[in-house]
Image: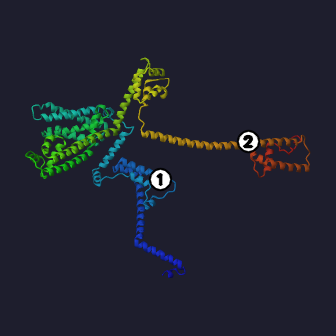
Amino acid sequence: LCFSRCGSCGIPSCIQHLRTMAEASRDLAQGTIEVMVSESVCAKERMEAREVEEAYQKFEESEEHIKELLDRGTISMDEARRLRTRAKMHQQEDQDEKPKISSAVLAGADHKTNEQIIEEALKPKKGWWLFESIRKALRFDKLQNKIQIEKHRRSLPEFEHRFPFIQNMVKTGMSFELFTFFLVACNGLLTGIQISVKGTESDLPIYSAMEEFFNVVFILEIILRVMADGWIWFFATGNTIDCILILVTGIVPSYILKPFFGIDSGELRIGQALRCVRLIRILKSVRTISAFRILWSLVSGIVDSGRILLWTLTIITVVLYMFSIFFVQLLVHGGLDLDDDQKEQVELYMKTVPDTMFTLFQCFTLDSWTGFSRILQVNQPMVGVLWLLFVAVGSLVLNNLVIAVIVNNAFARAEQDEELQASIARETTESELNDLRQLFDALLPSEDSVYLTREDYDDAVEKQNEILWTKLKLVNLEEDEIRDLWTYIDFPDQVDREEFASQIRNLKGECKAKHSYTVAMNLKKLDARLHQARTYLDTHKSICEALKKETTQAQLELSRALFELRQFVILTARCVPGSGIPATSSTERKLDSFQAQVAKTVQPLLTPIMDLPEENFREQLVMLREGQGFSLPGEVDEPPAPGG
């Protein structure tokens, strides 16, 4: 077959054809060809998908489409900002004139560019399809969009509040929050008193009047907060819960059920105890006040430890279950010789695993566990060992573990609270500045003095002023630094109170590793820039020196040329006769020849000076001479005509 097809190609070509056919047969048998075909088809599909995606992105990123989606409430302000950011990125790519590979080709090669990675990051995250469907069906997305637009409008600098006085009262300062905290605490106390005296002679009408007072005050609070923050205040989670609590436990029973239907719903009024939960939210607002910091640390430690406490309780349950099995097996099925009291205890408290778990939980809290365990330990050493092991693991380890988790979370939360840490830092700084101001006042020579001089400071140091040494040592200054403080800080001859306190306060502080690293990196960058500048200056210095040498050489050559020209002019002037010479044909020929030689000699010098072309130099020079009236060496001016 090969010979019939190849004709006169010869034996080597036939062998090559046979080898190619064998490789194709092997690839076909191993499925390599199918894989290659499949990869080609997938690459083509990826390229087509990328082209379709790019076309849809251009439509999606158009400003008209974005505005239309915003008006319909289909997308939020954040999603619109993402689309505009992506559109700006694509515009910069289109304006870039550098050669680049098409994104469709890269998609066919299953390669993601940086732009595609950014596009994926800018895509809005979709939630569960059921929630998304419910949100769109109930138009929550449009409501959310309106809320974001209103928040953005209120955050603009040109926004003018309708009630600035109420806004300042509610949003700035802590007076409003402290007053609300006090009212919520009093309302919780009143709820407890009402439940205690309900149905007794002590149930006085004043309690109902006070309850109505708190309802009115809380309704007024909501009105003030809405006037300060606008209608969007209702759509915060905590605010919604507050409104529901006040509505269900106050407004509905007092102003709807009782007046119109004559129903005194005590069950709804019991829910007033849940108003105490509002104390947590209000406490968060006043946590920067020093009197509430410890309370906030405890509350935040408990609230933030919910997940960890859940797993801790899971471990406790597993431990109780495990020890319950041990106790039931040992006491009920272990064949121990128990007396009547021990059998009675086992029958009452440890007959089954659930009963034993509840009993061990009571012992886990160390509630009268010794009176129960001592009876079972009489003449039963194995029971005593098991009790000690349970107390060691359960009470000593797990109990302390729960406390440690709460305390650790409380401190961790306080450290991560930037606003709280900033408040603590401000108070600490202000306290230290006040101490330094007092030190300044103590160092002044008289009460009328306003400035502290260096002589006054040196006198206080020499007299070993106790206040001076104590205060400055608290700023982490050594004795030598205290003595040379004036030079160390580079104070002027006299300094005022605020400058003295602030400059010395700036000396205190810990240098963290990141600060040292930042300084080291800045110094490294400055050193690199200085080295680069030094290299740049050295290079240009060498260039300037070479240029200076060339300039000096050019000046020397120019001086020599000028000297030679001067000598030439002097010698040529001697050859010019003082009176006119009658012109003859031979003389004219000689003069023309000499003039041509002179012009040929001085042409290189006169061409750059007079800006005359090299071609027809003689004719141009004659025209210039006739126009300006000068003669060259070797030329004789014709005498003027008679009467001219």
- Mark 1 / mark 2, whichever is N-terminal: 1
From the top left corner, tell me how far across and down residue 77 is, in percent.
Answer: 36, 47
Q: Nearer the viewer, residue 10 or 249?
A: 10
Q: Nearer the viewer, residue 479 or 28?
A: 479
Reply above or below: 382 against 255: below
From the top left corner, tell me how far across and down residue 487 is, in percent.
Answer: 49, 27
Reply above or below: 269 against 448: below
Judged from the image, the secondary structure of the residue bearing numbered disc 2 is helix
Q: Residue at x 51, y 56 (%)?
A: 99
For the view shown, which residue lies furthest in the left direction?
A: 340
- Residues at marks 1 and 2, CA–CA distance in whole angstroms: 56 Å
Q: Quadrant of the C terminus?
A: top right
Please name the residue that numbered disc 1 is placed on. 93
Judged from the image, the secondary structure of the residue bearing numbered disc 1 is helix
Q: Residue at x 48, y 20 (%)?
A: 455
Q: Nearer the viewer, residue 164 or 514?
A: 514
Residue 555 numbered tag: 2
**Residue 239 visible at all:** no
Tell whether 581 sits left or right of 368. Answer: right
From the top left corner, tell me how far across and down residue 267 is, in percent.
Answer: 15, 41
Tell whether 216 sits left or right of 489. Answer: left
**Circle 1 Cα neighbour tier, 10 Å, few/some/many (<14 / 14–19 / ≥20):** few
